[in-house]
Image: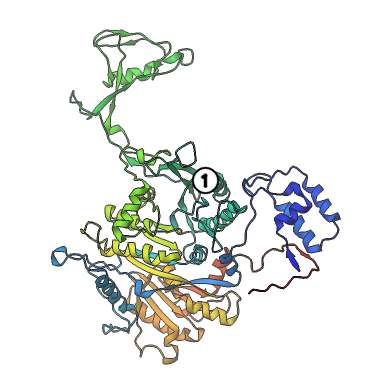
Amino acid sequence: MRVRLSPRFFCGFFFPELQPDAQTHHRPCAMNKADLIQKIKQLEGITQDERSYLINLVNTKKKYGLVWEDKPEEVEEQLRTQLPVLREVVERRIIAQASPNPSEGGVPEASQRLKLSAKNLQTSLFKSENLDQGGLEAPSPRGGLEGAAPNHILIEGDNLHALTALSFTHEGKIDVIYIDPPYNTGNKDFKYNDSYVDKEDGYRHSKWLSFMDKRLRIAKRLLSDKGVIFISIDDNEQAQLKMLCDEVFYLENYLASFVWKRRASSAMANQLVSIDHEVVLCYRQNGFISFKGVGKEFKGYKNPDNDPRGDWTSGDLTVGMNKDLRPNQYYDLYDPISKNTFKANPNRVWAYIPSSMEKLIAKNRVLFPSDVANRPMMKRFKNELKDSVNPVSTLLNSIENIKIGLNSEGTRLLQDVIDSNIFVYPKPLSLVKFLISQFYTSACTVLDFFAGSGTTLHAIMQLNAEDGGNRQCILVTNNENNICEDVTYERNRRVIQGYTNSKGEDVSGLTNNNLRYYKSEFVGREPSLKNKREIVRMATDLLCIKENCYEEKTLDLDFISHPYRKNIRYFEEKDKRMVIVYDDSAIESAVELIKSIIAKNQVKENGIKVYVFSPGQYPFTEEFEEVLPSISLCALPDALYKAFMNVLPKKNRPIIPVLEEEAETPNESTN
């Protein structure tokens, strides 16, 4: 019988002082590393591989910080032998169109909207009758929305696979990440390798940390230089997540832990305190980032004396300091009009030194009372104040001018849109809108790889409608219990195309949005010629996502030699142009196509992205020499491999010690 021993057991057996606590993740080890290594070298009864493993274990363990045992994850194991790509589910594509006129029958039924959406798909699937003279399909009008609508993306699949694929399309391009991961409460909210992790699981926290660590490290690679990540969490893993994020994003990039009140009613349960809050951890990628803040309400500002400087209010002119600490601000203040003298207070000195105070008096900024028993005050003008303030880190839903709802708001809205109770406790739209709106530009790319009910995309489409922004959203979620199809997709389809709410009222759609639905697929990781050709064939949708260019132009059958037609595809959308050459034998025809594109359009330098299949790293620069100034060449699948290798697990897991035992295993029978 072959007994497989975990590193935790093996290390703990020989060195109990190295044994980690699976719950607290603290390692009470005070031994000298050199002494431990010497002991390991002198151990008998272990193999050289086991000896090397233990020495490596000692050398890599941290003296301080979060420590847990990495637990193998099936979806990660799949990536040791396979590479992920994305395939679009074309029948679920939604393309921007004019809003329906309520006076002409109101909002279409769901089945009618799906037919309308499906009808719009055909332009990229079949050759059009509308061909221009260059042999390329002319773009079809879309009610003035051509190119204006952002391309939102929904990916169905495990988020580790999707993040790996996005490492090719979006490395350094994501501006805002918002995620609401499973909280690991032990109440069937977190699955690991298809099994729920309960409260009695000795590896409960280690499994969750292993799960989060892999995903957050890829997420960091996706963030832009000025990017920011928001992570919702509760007290079950808040402390562990904070330490993990300090390690992944670095402590100096920690911005805040926003505290959000999630419920109004008491939640005592078996505790002595009602836990009614959650936390939103916030980290930046690096460098300086400035939140937009929230608008102020200027209460109490009036202009009773018609001051030409506008509305004002009175403010304190003293500070709570002892005269011995601020002797130059301890003096009697003289009113040149009333001739009154206001005595200095030894425990509350004036806010300004005498020379600065004289300037304020000369500018009529000091308000002298008629009674010397009262204190002079200062005029503070409304137009001197900033029109916004930074958000505070506590109680987001109590900020002046901000109405951030409770969890019940998210539940009501989801039921209103799709009349479903499948998804429990979705985040309120107002919370996600507030967080995303804090980013400095309204033309940003937002990622949510724990998409759940799809609140993040709903929030972004509403923000764009409110402020004219052009934010793009990428959602990732699995399809357990058909959540991706029946909740995430269905909710946002209705938000885009319009729906009838629970009260029977028609709600107009946010129609200036495109939504594209993808599924994860895989190709062998071994870099054989067969696998290289297959991944290039399967990478078309990844390339469209990377270049944000989706409109395929059908090629004239007479334009390209017959054997090579299937090996070249051309995409064009506004000023974006992309040519994909699936076989190097079609390069000559691809050059002729590019010449035609250049002749018909004002193509800027490097204005056409050309992806060409190459068995190695060479992108056939010499073969494209005639059109080289107008194109940007990239060899496939080499570019894919390079991106993936930065995030993929090693092909073979580290050596784990095993113990051989000779034993008979009794046969089992069932009746």
Q: Is residue 482 above or below residue 285?
A: below
Q: What element carries label 1?
A: helix
The N terminus: image quadrant = bottom right
Q: Which of 72 and 530 is in front in this view?
A: 72
Residue at image mark 1: 238
Q: What residue type is labelled 1?
A: Gln
What residue is at 38 percent from the left and 43 percent from the top? 263
**34 with respect to 580 (left or right):** right
- The crowding category of the residue bearing disc 1, from other C-alpha atoms within 10 Å (few below 14, some 14 to 19, many at least 20), is some
Residue 600 on image: x %, y %:
32, 78
**653 with respect to 262 (left or right):** right
The C terminus: image quadrant = bottom right
Look at the image and tell me whether residue 292 can be seen. yes
Look at the image and tell me whether residue 605 can be seen. no
Q: Nearer the viewer, residue 321 or 110?
A: 110
Residue projecting furthest to the front: 671
What residue is at 41 percent from the left and 80 percent from the top? 569
Q: Is residue 113 above or below residue 64?
A: below
Q: Which of 614 and 658 is in front in this view?
A: 658
Residue 70 on image: x %, y %:
63, 57
**265 with respect to 80 (left or right):** left
Q: In this view, does 508 lie above or below 669?
A: above
Residue 27 on image: x %, y %:
68, 45
Residue 412 on image: x %, y %:
31, 52
In which image quadrant can residue 491 be found?
A: bottom left
Q: Which of 444 and 462 is in front in this view?
A: 462
What residue is at 81 percent from the left and 54 percent from the top? 40
